[in-house]
Image: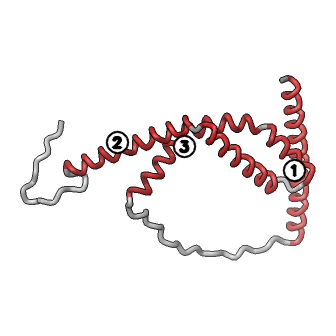
Amino acid sequence: MTIVRKNTLNTTPSPSISPPENLAEKYREAERMRDVLLLLQNLINSEEATVKLILDCLYDVGSVNLINQKLPLKPLNRLMKLIARMSKPVFRTLAFNWFKKNCPKLITDWLQTKVSFENPPNTPEQVAIEVVQLEPYTIPQRENLSQEIKNLRSQVRWLAAISVIAIAILGVTATRLN
């Protein structure tokens, strides 16, 4: 237990001690934000089909864009899109469970920052960066490095092809077992 004495000379309240009306406002704000959280959870539970359709749309767009960005080779690209379509039901289940567990809190926190009307955090000052000129590699070093890069790229292609084949075989085996 701590005893706090009021200083008669200092009439301004300290920043750590809030007047009772501010405490009541903070309590009411916390209560209302809890209500928003419960309403969002209720909305997600009652509109499960809508949430799943939204997640399906996001998966369709995101998976195609990611595959197009990461795999420019046409045969590999088509195969990965087929695998992405086959894995959609698993994604839907996992994504909906994650969404139901995390998104009401994330949305509530985001909405609270929007209605708090506090000043945005100060942007850090720009720091001057000293740029040092690097000396280029010598010709034998450049040739050696370019050869290493070519070897690594070919190894990555082989590993990607082997991975895709293994995933395809796993998918076919799983579908036949079901």
Front residue of 127/31: it is: 31
What residue is rendered at 47% in x and 67% in y?
Answer: 123
Q: Position of residue 89 (x, y in %)?
A: 74, 35
Residue, disc 2: 31
Q: Nearer the viewer, residue 14 or 145?
A: 14
- Pick whichever of labels 2 and 3 is earlier in the sequence: 2
| Disc 1 + disc 2, Cβ < 8 Å | no
From the image, tell me which residue sits under label 1: 77
Q: Which residue is mark 3?
A: 103
Residue 169, horizontal then vertical, whole percent: 89, 33
Which dot marks residue 166? Answer: none
Amino acid type, residue under disc 1 in the picture: Asn
Assign a secondary structure to mark 3.
helix
Sequence-wise, which precedes: disc 1 or disc 2?
2
How far, Cα to Cα, is label 2 from label 3?
A: 19 Å
Residue 21 percent location from the top left of the image: 21, 50
Specify the quadrant of the image occupied by residue 128.
bottom right
**Can the viewer see residue 159 in this picture?**
no
Q: Secondary structure at mark 2?
A: helix
Q: Is 52 situated above or below 110? A: above
Could you tell me the amino acid type at mark 3? Cys
Residue 127 percent location from the top left of the image: 52, 72
* Residue at horizontal 40 percent and vertical 56 percent from the top: 115
Q: Residues within 10 Å of mark 2 (few under 14, many from 20)?
A: few
Residue density around tag 1, few if under 14, some if 14–19, many if 20 or more, within 10 Å: some
